[in-house]
Amino acid sequence: MAVAEKSDEQYFDEVYDNIARLYDHAENLLNSAYHEDVEDHEKFLAEIEPIIQQIENSANSIAEDFSTIIEKGELPTNAMKRRVNSSLRKILLAIQEYRASITD
């Protein structure tokens, strides 16, 4: 039984780490706007802000569901799984929209 619990603990640690990475990605994007190679920091920030905001919103939503799972000690519901998938798709959509805007 201890092996199963350890496996669950490792799984939850990985999920937590992945959520934290989303916040790290948002912070790294924000920091990139102020990199010395960027000529117009404010313009670049305005261009990437929708991605940063979406990553943060999605990470918040996923973290909230994850917190609920931990507190209740239950498996994720189908609604939670759909919210996570939707949150991740929204990040990808924001990235695609940015890519389209810079190629125009």
Image (tube, rainbow, N blue to C red):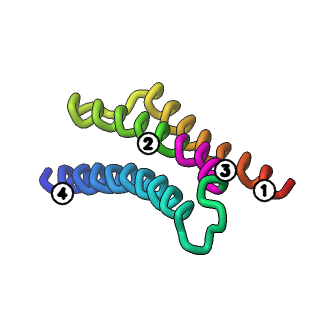
Q: Mark 1 and mark 2: span between their CA atoms?
A: 25 Å
Q: Which mark is residue 1?
A: none
- Which amino acid, mark 4? Val
Q: Residues within 10 Å of mark 2 (few under 14, many from 20)?
A: many
**Viewer-nearest of discs 2 and 3:** 3
Dot 4 or dot 2: first in sequence order is 4
CB atoms at circles 2 and 3 under 8 Å apart? no
Question: Which stretch appears magenta?
Answer: 44-53
Q: Nearer the viewer, residue 77 or 27?
A: 27
Q: Please indicate whether residue 92 sits to the left or right of residue 82 in the image.
A: right
Residue 71 image point, x, y percent: 21, 32
Q: Please indicate whether residue 15 sits to the left or right of residue 39 in the image.
A: left
Q: Nearer the viewer, residue 81 or 65?
A: 65
Q: Which mark is residue 47?
A: 3
Dot 4 or dot 1: first in sequence order is 4
Q: Which mark is residue 102?
A: 1
Q: Residue furthest bottom?
A: 37
Q: Quadrant of residue 63?
A: top left
- Which amino acid, mark 1? Ile
Dot 4 or dot 3: first in sequence order is 4
